[in-house]
Amino acid sequence: MGVKIEWSMIQNAWDKRVCEDYWAYNHKISYADYVRMLCQKYNISSQILFETVSQCYTCLDDVCCEYCGSACPIEVPADIAYMQAKESWFCAVCEHAMWRSDFISK
């Protein structure tokens, strides 16, 4: 699948397990049911779940910016299939730079 998780320095082993479980979502059940299941498993609220998950940086190492080569960041599991289905992708910095150079040259 190509999901790569980069940990924050403040995350502990429990945080890492929660994040790994969150990103292991396989679309066999609905996303909402999966979130509820994780909240029950770890006995946490959805707010704590998302706060924990937001502490790590997650990207697709098999989808890279066509210009600079940086990996594609993702925020929710639904982004995985969507981004992998795209023929090309540009990161926000490169997209802005290309838009700006097109605008200036006109």
Image (cartoon, rainbow, N blue to C red):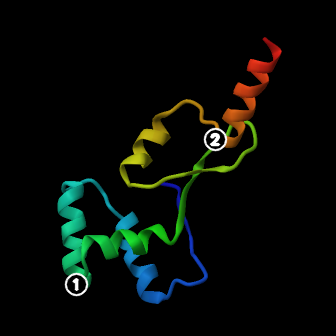
Extreme residue toward the top, this view: 106
Q: Residues within 10 Å of mark 2 (few under 14, many from 20)?
A: few
Q: Quadrant of residue 40?
A: bottom left
Indicate which disc residue 105 carries: none
Across and down, in percent, residue 12 comes to 49, 88
Could you give the CA–CA distance between mark 2 and mark 1, rounded to whole angstroms?
36 Å
Tell me the quadrant of the picture where the C terminus can be found: top right
Residue 69: horizontal and vertical position, in percent? 72, 45
| SS category of the residue bearing label 2 | helix
Amino acid type of the residue that numbered disc 1 sits on in the rendered structure: Asn
Q: Position of residue 51 (x, y in %)?
A: 40, 72
Q: Give left or right: position of 30 versus 7.
A: left
Residue 78, relative to residue 20: is it above or below?
Answer: above
- Residue 20 visible: no
Q: Give the residue drawn at x 69%, y 34%.
A: 96
The residue nearer to you, when weighing 34 against 9, is 9
Check disc 1 and report the residue beneath it: 43
Question: Which residue is drawn at the image coordinates 19% and 71% (left, top)?
Answer: 37
Question: Amino acid type of disc 2?
Answer: Ala
Pick whichever, 27 or 95, lies toward us: 95
56 relative to 102, above or below: below
**Within-10-Å neighbours for mark 1: few <14, some 14–19, many 20+:** few
Residue topped by disc 2: 92
Ranked by sequence position, the earlier of labels 2 and 1 is 1
Image vertical order of residue 23 relative to residue 10, above or below = above
Give above or below for 90 relative to 20: above
Local SS, label 1: loop
Residue at (57% x, 75% y) in the render = 7
